Amino acid sequence: MDITAVGGYKAVGRNMTGVSIGNDTVALDNGLRLDMLQMYDADISDIKKVNVEQLIKLDVIPEYERLRNVRAQIISHGHLDHIGALPFTRPRVPIISTPYPIEIGRREYREGDFFAVEYNEHFSVSKRIKVEFIPVTHSIPETSLVLLRTSEGNVVYACDYKLDDHSALGKTDYGRLRKVGHEGVKLLIVESTRVKEAGKTSSENVVRSKLQDVLNFIDDGLIVATTFSSHIERIQMILDEVEKTGRKPVILGHSMLNHTELAERFDYLDMPPDARVYGTPKAIKYALNEVKRNREDYFVLATGHQAEPESVLIRMLEGQFNFRFQKRDSVLFCANVIPVPLNIAQRTVLESKLQSKGVRIFKDIHVSGHASKEDHRRLLELLKPGHIIPCHGTIEQRSAWVALASEEGYELNKNTHLINNGQTIKI
Amino acid sequence: MDITAVGGYKAVGRNMTGVSIGNDTVALDNGLRLDMLQMYDADISDIKKVNVEQLIKLDVIPEYERLRNVRAQIISHGHLDHIGALPFTRPRVPIISTPYPIEIGRREYREGDFFAVEYNEHFSVSKRIKVEFIPVTHSIPETSLVLLRTSEGNVVYACDYKLDDHSALGKTDYGRLRKVGHEGVKLLIVESTRVKEAGKTSSENVVRSKLQDVLNFIDDGLIVATTFSSHIERIQMILDEVEKTGRKPVILGHSMLNHTELAERFDYLDMPPDARVYGTPKAIKYALNEVKRNREDYFVLATGHQAEPESVLIRMLEGQFNFRFQKRDSVLFCANVIPVPLNIAQRTVLESKLQSKGVRIFKDIHVSGHASKEDHRRLLELLKPGHIIPCHGTIEQRSAWVALASEEGYELNKNTHLINNGQTIKI
Amino acid sequence: MDITAVGGYKAVGRNMTGVSIGNDTVALDNGLRLDMLQMYDADISDIKKVNVEQLIKLDVIPEYERLRNVRAQIISHGHLDHIGALPFTRPRVPIISTPYPIEIGRREYREGDFFAVEYNEHFSVSKRIKVEFIPVTHSIPETSLVLLRTSEGNVVYACDYKLDDHSALGKTDYGRLRKVGHEGVKLLIVESTRVKEAGKTSSENVVRSKLQDVLNFIDDGLIVATTFSSHIERIQMILDEVEKTGRKPVILGHSMLNHTELAERFDYLDMPPDARVYGTPKAIKYALNEVKRNREDYFVLATGHQAEPESVLIRMLEGQFNFRFQKRDSVLFCANVIPVPLNIAQRTVLESKLQSKGVRIFKDIHVSGHASKEDHRRLLELLKPGHIIPCHGTIEQRSAWVALASEEGYELNKNTHLINNGQTIKI
Amino acid sequence: MDITAVGGYKAVGRNMTGVSIGNDTVALDNGLRLDMLQMYDADISDIKKVNVEQLIKLDVIPEYERLRNVRAQIISHGHLDHIGALPFTRPRVPIISTPYPIEIGRREYREGDFFAVEYNEHFSVSKRIKVEFIPVTHSIPETSLVLLRTSEGNVVYACDYKLDDHSALGKTDYGRLRKVGHEGVKLLIVESTRVKEAGKTSSENVVRSKLQDVLNFIDDGLIVATTFSSHIERIQMILDEVEKTGRKPVILGHSMLNHTELAERFDYLDMPPDARVYGTPKAIKYALNEVKRNREDYFVLATGHQAEPESVLIRMLEGQFNFRFQKRDSVLFCANVIPVPLNIAQRTVLESKLQSKGVRIFKDIHVSGHASKEDHRRLLELLKPGHIIPCHGTIEQRSAWVALASEEGYELNKNTHLINNGQTIKI
């Protein structure tokens, strides 16, 4: 069995791993690296004009062409660092995932040959490889641990996940994982973004407690919150908690509109009857016109958690939409700052401007969607894999997986492997 | 009205403020600075041998003698940085607080002339000064905002507090505060430890969510948790949540014994029937003898959150009590590391040793007991004080209060005042 | 004597202090706050269109109009945070400094009524106020401690300075300072940017050692260095050391051209005969055309130490001027990163892009131009002022001056004073 | 060729690498990990009572017994993390180094079978292995790059070193390195402690500039400096610079006495005629008795840069030796704080106590002795090794070497190798 590190084996993002059994290769994920896009001001809005060589060279997309004999492109979940490179790498093979990520993928890459596989079913990629999706918790609906049943043994691809046993949306299928573990797992390919963090990643329930506490505290002004548009469980929780305050929820932003529409269609989101979503600048301006006259009656959920220049929050702050923040308004950040310098800078400027207008800021109403050290240890206990290949991280981050694995009796280069983008290893 | 900064106006700890109306002075709090004790290895176990001059010089206790014409010593709550210097400064005047802190004070300073005042009552210190205690939330039972009604106007002393509206133990009396605000407050003396933090301090409910999540996650081994012995609300919550797991709680440590006994007597703690508390080394050894044979049946709550050399957790780790940690045991830190270098070092060593034994570590199951920026802003809104004197902090920390006050229209040196230990200001 | 904090008493930058004796006021410095310009994308290139109210509100320039009865505008040195607001505040009184800053000021504000005063001379602002400039070391030629001899006592304004006794350019006049100290100084107004740093600020000699070490080490490729255009002593040192390597120095950038021209005219810079300076894009392109063909023969000194988007270094990196960086080229940062988020982000991106091209990076070939704790203590010893007002810093930074002053027997609010922008204090 | 990672392949310290050609193994270095000693309060003063198993388990010494067929123990230089485990592992084979480290080794391990090899000579370990020492710069005299000429190719062991071309003591033999590079190097085993740092490590000349600047600045009080006792080049520089101030140097501490005596004997240190060295408490007390009466005439160089509890500086501070620090004394730290929590804590306490006595503190008069990224890149250029094994560092630190190697065309697992303690790799 040959494992090829295509993307995500040098830095966080643009994930792709190849698994080859004889002449049959599957590509796992096909993602973007967003901070590089931003760093190099790469314009990908007009896909026809994009220079793919250039995007590969800038570490924005994985070098898909490095893989030979690809029979299928498998997608673990719908985040852009796992699915967003499809329109650039343009795989001409079946693209396989569960229905929700498939739908996201279709919007990105219209010409793709997509196949939706339900949980508890499987898809035969070739004689030698079958794929099955096992439900797991993360920060977007229908995230899966991918099980490849191959003629040379089982491979599990766990990128990304956390173990949240109080999630309102989706459950980790521990029974299935335990069963696969008993059957035998030859190789675990597993994300490394937060393996260095002690303990387990907190449940979304902790966010609910924080949010209740803050909403109960604020007694006047307009409340504006921001979070990840794709984080449907979080959005549902915010809407549920806002309901209790009597404020009317107004959801603003193109990306919010897209994600909530899709999630409603799949029954992952149960929008309260008085909630309204507006995507276009014109509609947003119209909505804010009403909001600003009765600030205490409304709760706005808007794009802009990373202070992206084109987001609704930033444009509200800059006086577009005929809107002005006022003293005694509140802004809730239901997201962390992604720790790359540009985001830190943009966010600092945003907070500083809000503060100069007398707006109250509430931060860190958030927990991560990525497994910490004890989540990972638990996965090891369930699967007891023969080999481990950490992915999705710098070599320093992946090295922390080596440390965890060695606590559990694994050994570097023998059954724990560090490989870099472009390398192939035989297991 | 003269305000004298005696202690806590240069660094966190050893709080004491004097308020003088004509010839009548009251001393507010009388605390220790624990990190200085530790830094200078000062031995205060034998009170008779302690050199008080030396303790003042080392910034361990406030210079009580600086105050003239003291009529009463008032205590806001039972933490040692507010009450712990009593046996050294030995005030010969009535020592006044609510019943619970009084009881703690009595244990520290037996010869004291203590007076317990109930909430909704008041105590006349002199013709010119009456004192009233207003309930507020913090991390020890019966924490009060102290209201001095004087012939020259009302003074509120808010040191320490947070606004936790989901606290299981005690409530902030917002009605009373609002009423006092309407009456008029000439001066607010207010703590500064976390005024720089954005937002509000999270409720203890957030700790409950985190704890539930972790307890539900751990499925084998012994669980050992550690928290502040005086934090009765936290201890109650831990015991309640442990109850649901079916494990038997065993509470270890002299200081745990003292505080839980007192809290039970005052009905602040409702100990589950199967809980046991052991204070002496012999009793602890006896208890652990049983615990270690049925690790999965027990939950140990022990002293040692700051890795204090004499704590139960450290002694368990070092193999005393015939106990050894094993792989698959878990340690839960329901406390932060107090951010002074010695504590950071001790805690790092502790975690490193636990890890080398394969113990799983869960950290930060904790929220602060101190007000953040928005809690403080709320207090300003409620009291609308004429003047503000930030206390309990370095000049940098207290300067952050000046920044908040200026957002609310106050002005430095006019109605917001920075004074240092040893200085007196006329309001 | 009334002292008015106009700018620099809340954050670093846009310095202005007013000193009033009866009806006569002098304004000390008149500076910009550059990071606010950048944060708010304020466009000041077309001065006629600038909204001055707006610039004041955004904390970009000081509110000059707050001062009454101004008789003179005094400038301590030519940095923009001390002189750059002149074209916006447009004072109609004599603008007084030593010849070099006067020349810089004239370029910024053509209509100004400038008076140059030589060292060892003085200027009578009014019957009550005479001004004298005392030489001190800093990072631009002709930086002065400003001595105001007033009918109510001497005032010294020390903003900015360091004590560098190995400076190749200029000397601190210790004799004069000691003499003024003996005469008596009523008030010292003094910068706070680095008073928290232990020890003394290192001499420029330390930069020379580092630079020699690096230049001696690099044995191939092109060397590009960047530093502050106004830091003439640093530029001289770089040119002197480059001379020893046999490489030809090429200086690029509009701002470099301006500052080196002026410094040469004043004999503060002795340009080596083979050095060339190019300011316009066309000239820079022409110069780089030659440089890139003989990379090992050249040393380029360019603007861009903060990765400013319009700087020469950034445009070289982005392939403008027909230039490309190559593997084995080296970039030397003879400047620190100014620690505001936007600069940190821009610089990180710059380093990352250089690294991706295989360019070797040498950082921190730099020492600060601002006094550390021991430099400040020495100034106290020399002047023995009656009162101290820290300026040029956040309240936290200025609070650190209070701590230093108290080590030397001063007392807050008695003879050390913290005031905020907009406040006046009587001494 | 088999390479065995014995120690230093998980954390910094206790270095040992085995190189085996057929049945012949050489052990490279044999060091202690000092922070673990301190963390576990391990007492190694009475060697006879030490439990060697325990020391291995605590990661204090390398597991020497893991190596089979050892023919020689080679020592690269005299620092304890390279030589200090000799008395515990007690190798019964020839111990080989250049004369100076041999002398240090002999003092540690009296029964050892030591062989001194001069530069430009070689020693035949067996038919298959010859060893040669190549001079390189570091922070102790006679540091060597170790060249193993084996029947299967050349191996270079570069642990530790920096490239300081302005060192007053010793030179890097670039000619020899270049020649070895031309001959061919199969494998480079190389330290990783600072490979993440950009640029090159600064020369000791930079320390000289800083020291001159500080010594010139201080004009009264006693000056006490502290640095590494084994850093003879630094000590010589300090003594030379002190000479110029006219102060008499007094060197205090057992370890200072040992190292300076040895260095003088080897002509690596040229002690000024008026310098005095005192090692015993009694002698130190006697010396300080004179010093304290004429503080401005003396310069004290003492042990204690890490605030070790038994050091002279700490004991001076605590009032032993009948000595008291006074206001206007100065302490110079010619060393960094070793970044482990206990050292950081001890040093913070030390500085805080000094400050409370009014002592002036000057820090960071220091540069590292370890290679930065560009030093390492230069070594690669000189040696052009076929394979690279980073040693002496955590896996994160060693991973940074992988990143550098990949910039130079090397590939992980192909010709760059990460191995952990206890592992053997075939090259």
Image (cartoon, coloured by chain):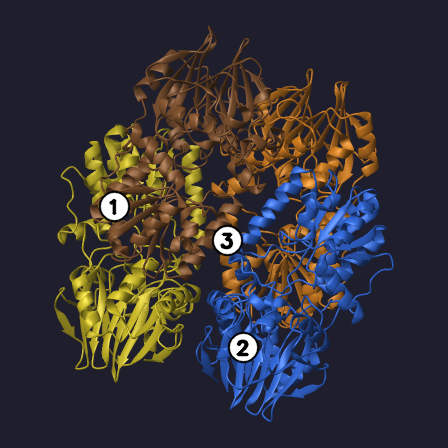
Chain colours: A blue, B orange, C brown, D yellow
Residue D253 appearing in the image: no
Q: Which residue is mark 3?
A: B346
Residue D66: percent from the left, percent from the top? 34, 77
Q: Which residue is mark 1?
A: C242
Residue A2: percent from the left, percent from the top? 49, 84
Q: Nearer the viewer, mark 2 or mark 3?
A: 2
Q: Secondary structure at mark 1?
A: helix
Q: Is residue B325 left or right of residue A333?
A: left
Mark 2 Cα within 10 Å, few/some/many (few <14, many 20+)?
many
Say if C286 sits above or below A202 in the image: above
The amino acid on which the numbered mark 3 sits, given as a three-letter code, is Gln
Q: Which residue is mark 2?
A: A17
Badge 2 and badge 1 both on one subunit? no
Query: How far is disc 2 from disc 3 in space, using C-alphas?
Result: 42 Å
Q: Is residue D400 left or right of residue A260?
A: left
Q: Nearer the viewer, mark 2 or mark 1?
A: 1
Letter of the chain that mark 2 sits on in the rendering: A
The amino acid on which the numbered mark 2 sits, given as a three-letter code, is Thr
Of C319 and D249, the residue lying toward us: C319
